[in-house]
Amino acid sequence: MTDYLELAAPGVKGLRPYQPGKPVEELEREYGISNIIKLASNENPLGPSPLALDAIRQELDQLARYPDGNGFVLKQALSTKLGVPQSHITLGNGSNDILEIIVRAFATPDNDIIFSRHAFAVYPLVVKAINAKPVETPAKDWGHDLDAMTEAVTENTRLIFIANPNNPTGTWLAGAALKAFIAGLPRHVIVVVDEAYFEYAIDPRMQAEGYPDALQWLDEFPNLIVTRTFSKAYGLAALRVGYAVSHPGIADLLNRVRQPFNVNHLALVAASAALNDAQHLDKGIHLNAVGMQQLVEGFDAMGLTFIPSVGNFISVDVGKEAAGVYDALLREGVIVRPVANYQMPNHLRVTIGLAQENARFLQSLQKVLA
Amino acid sequence: MTDYLELAAPGVKGLRPYQPGKPVEELEREYGISNIIKLASNENPLGPSPLALDAIRQELDQLARYPDGNGFVLKQALSTKLGVPQSHITLGNGSNDILEIIVRAFATPDNDIIFSRHAFAVYPLVVKAINAKPVETPAKDWGHDLDAMTEAVTENTRLIFIANPNNPTGTWLAGAALKAFIAGLPRHVIVVVDEAYFEYAIDPRMQAEGYPDALQWLDEFPNLIVTRTFSKAYGLAALRVGYAVSHPGIADLLNRVRQPFNVNHLALVAASAALNDAQHLDKGIHLNAVGMQQLVEGFDAMGLTFIPSVGNFISVDVGKEAAGVYDALLREGVIVRPVANYQMPNHLRVTIGLAQENARFLQSLQKVLA
């Protein structure tokens, strides 16, 4: 047996794994530099609520026990917070796990799965892994083109992924348009509204402009799944907690595919506790808004164009192939995210950091581009 | 859309999720009793090494960061400990994740996947989830019948699962027989040797009787995958860390299917630290041997037969349908594991606990059976 690829499942043969943001330790090892800042993975610069840390410390004598496979405590907390029954909730090892579970529960190699150009890179990955057919629709002003997505639907379409807001573009869809789109879908199509950056987009300004909370439509559209995460605004990316909210019939199927202990115990208790700290969440959202303004002004001052974003990140056009700029920033100790794999070769995606991190990034960018 | 089952992938329609051991909190909620002992999930009664707890405490300021998707530090520690290159290792969110990744990487609905009667319940689950064909071979003295497994191989066979020792029977295969079995397999068949309970079986007594470390055969058999876990002897079930060791060509394919952040950050650092505490590991293995003797003597005194086990658990025949005995034990505040789903309706599986837990279980069993 010399070629293992011959034995691999068909979808796996062509699979190229997701490329994460470069970890700080890796840059230290490879380049031998220190004092590094990482603005590459849309992580919360404030970290999680102190309540989450307390919850972890209190459970350190429970590590030999398997997690509660039903995630009762976290589901109860989410149920209260969101106003949905526990039977509507599916817990995931991050949103990534949820997206994979959805595809595995509902799609086969005979199905088309639709997503937009420049949308989150995990969508095509989970589709290809099961050898289903990825259908990428064109973008409109860097965002999702709902008309193009409607036109792409066939009798073989089983799933549509909508990121709202989208990563890495930061674009968003207003409630009226998105609702009309979902209402117009045939009954055999399940639509996943991925709200990983929801918390950043619900400030009063965005709500006034029509950014929707898709949970409000669950009763109306039984073919709707809304996904969220604790990795962004809740500052718990290290622990891997995401969730889906859907009709209980869908949740039942997702929970059949879900691994019985997919979310670990410390993750369950930390996420439950973090839900109780609205003040910390608000502080992070405010910091993000101020930092976004700082970057936008910096880009304007440098004469760089960018895609207006409602997330905790922004994609800036560096005016040329961005790979070299990314490398030069690494040598300055600044990690951002190249997005050539999103068909955005001239952009870099930068996470909003602390004020001093944003300032250092802007200075380094100016130096590198000079 | 009234019937979501119509939209589900074929394997998912018949899927019944894994039934975990009953959590202590659930029994408290349902029965309103306290002072509960749980001997239901083969958890280490000593808990993990204190080094693991220290490692977690030191990383609590890193929770907003994504885990290292490559798991560099843990792979490095495992590589040193096991004497295999890092390129041979695949990390999983528990062994369960590893087993699922293996099936998804190598099998399709056209493939047969072989496992033994009374073998670990997750094997048929991961097979059914992808709609491959589960092939269950008969047991021999409650353990794997390697001749029957060899006979079951067809041109469509892609995977064989061997649990050594097996859960829930505690049976094991000697090195010579297992090696001859693997050597006799055709080249298109990948064999997974699941060594979740490996650490309990490697005491000098077992090694003298021929219990093998399957890692020694990796160079010889490129179609071999060995899986292990930190959930049992290392006492870290709450954190979900398992791993596979294989030819790097196989590891490459497994890592393509693996979710990029499948093992969370606290799990990575705790597992790495736990590997450095050989003394704690030995203490747990010794405690287990003494406790096993305590239960065996207790069963003998009650005239109950049991399956001799080299794991950290033992399955006892209660002489009648065990479901009622299980329920009666719950009311006594003692959680053990019914194994009717393993086609062992008269057995209960009991985890070896602390001496006082073992004693209380034996007293409760005697009372309930009286």
Image (cartoon, coloured by chain):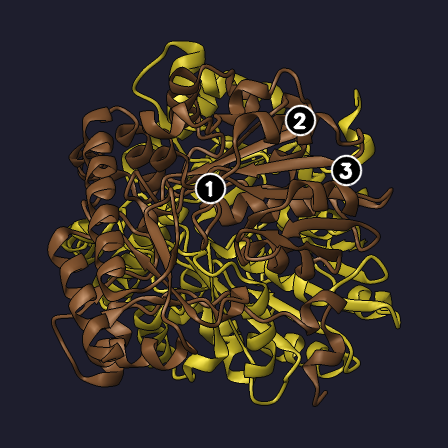
Chain colours: A brown, B yellow
* Residue B172: quadrant of the picture: bottom right
Depth check, mark 1 against mark 2: the one in front is 2
At mark 2, the secondary structure is helix
Q: Amino acid at mark 3?
A: Ala
Distance CA(mark 1)–CA(mark 3): 28 Å
Residue carrying label 1: A165
Distance CA(mark 2)–CA(mark 3): 25 Å
Depth check, mark 2 against mark 3: the one in front is 2
At mark 3, the secondary structure is loop
* B292 lies left or right of B190: left
Please say whether residue B306 is visible from this viewpoint: no
> Which residue is at a point 76% across and 80% down the rendered structure image?
A6
* Residue B17: quadrant of the picture: top right
> Where is B164 relative to A188, above or below?
below
* Residue B161: quadrant of the picture: bottom right
At mark 1, the secondary structure is loop
Q: Are marks 1 and 3 in contact (CB under 8 Å)?
A: no
Nearer to me, B291 or A87:
A87
Image location (x, y in percent) of residue A70: 49, 30
Nearer to me, B354 or A111:
A111
Q: Amino acid at mark 2?
A: Ala
* B262 lies left or right of B17: left
Residue carrying label 3: B8
Mark 1: give few (<14), some (14-19) or many (20+) Cα within 10 Å.
many
> Which is nearer the N-term, disc 1 or disc 2?
1
Mark 3: give few (<14), some (14-19) or many (20+) Cα within 10 Å.
many
Residue carrying label 2: A180
> Which residue is at a point 21% across and 45% down the rendered structure image?
A47
Please say whether residue B252 is visible from this viewpoint: yes
